Image (spheres, rainbow, N blue to C red):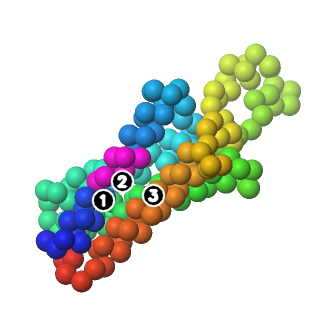
Amino acid sequence: MSEASRAARFLALAAPLFLLGGAYVSQYVFGLYPCEMCWWQRYPHFAALALAGLAFVIPPARLFVALAALAIAVSGLIGGFHAGVEYGWWEGLTACTGNALGHGADPLEAIMGAPVIRCDVAPWSLFGISLAGWNFLFSGAAALAIAFLLTRKGSAS
């Protein structure tokens, strides 16, 4: 296995591990609980972890690394969509972005059934970029880096 392939395999494991670790630290240490779209971003990272792990034990490693990169890219795209919802660029697809009280609804029932965490409100940001935006940036960069490393000459295996 070439140096580029080893680096791609390591990055395919490290990127989702780092991003999921950050998500769980922000949730359990800092109290930033995930909304529905935040969970959507985590699912592809779980898949990427499994695929990257398989790349360490089942040949051809390159196939599993490429699939992990695809899963990481999917999480990044979901993060980009979510960031757009948070910034008000477009509407979200879920009930967690709507008004809790619908017309003619029982107010108590609406409050009790309303989602706790809204998808269209960024609970935290750094340099004006929300967590979903950071996921978009980091996942996109990782997926591109893995793809680049896999296309390097001598990266077979």
> Which residue is located at x 28 percent, y 65 percent?
8
Q: Is residue 76 magenta?
A: no
Which quadrant is home to the C terminus?
bottom left
x and y percentages locating residue 14 in the rendered image? 31, 52
Name which quarter of the figure residue 89 lies in: bottom right
The relative height of residue 35 versus residue 156 in the rendered view (above or below) is above
User: 67 above or below 110?
Assistant: below
* Residue at 86 percent of width and 31 percent of height: 103
Task: Identify the residue under disc 2.
Answer: 15
Most distant residue in the right direction: 104
| Residues in magenta, as a range | 13-19
Picture disc at residue 11: 1
Q: Which residue is mark 3?
A: 139
Q: Earlier in the sequence, mark 3 or mark 2?
A: 2
Task: Report the front residue among 87 and 92.
Answer: 87
- The kind of residue on which mark 2 rests is Ala
Q: Is residue 15 magenta?
A: yes
Mark 2–mark 1 CB contact (< 8 Å): yes
Amino acid tagged 1: Leu
Q: Amino acid at mark 3?
A: Ser
The residue that appears at 42% across and 34% down in the rendered structure is: 24
Alpha carbon separation for disc pair 3 and 2: 7 Å
> Left of 150 or right of it: where is 132?
right
Q: Earlier in the sequence, mark 1 or mark 3?
A: 1
Tags 3 and 2 in contact by the CB under 8 Å rule? yes
Alpha carbon distance from label 1 to label 3:
11 Å
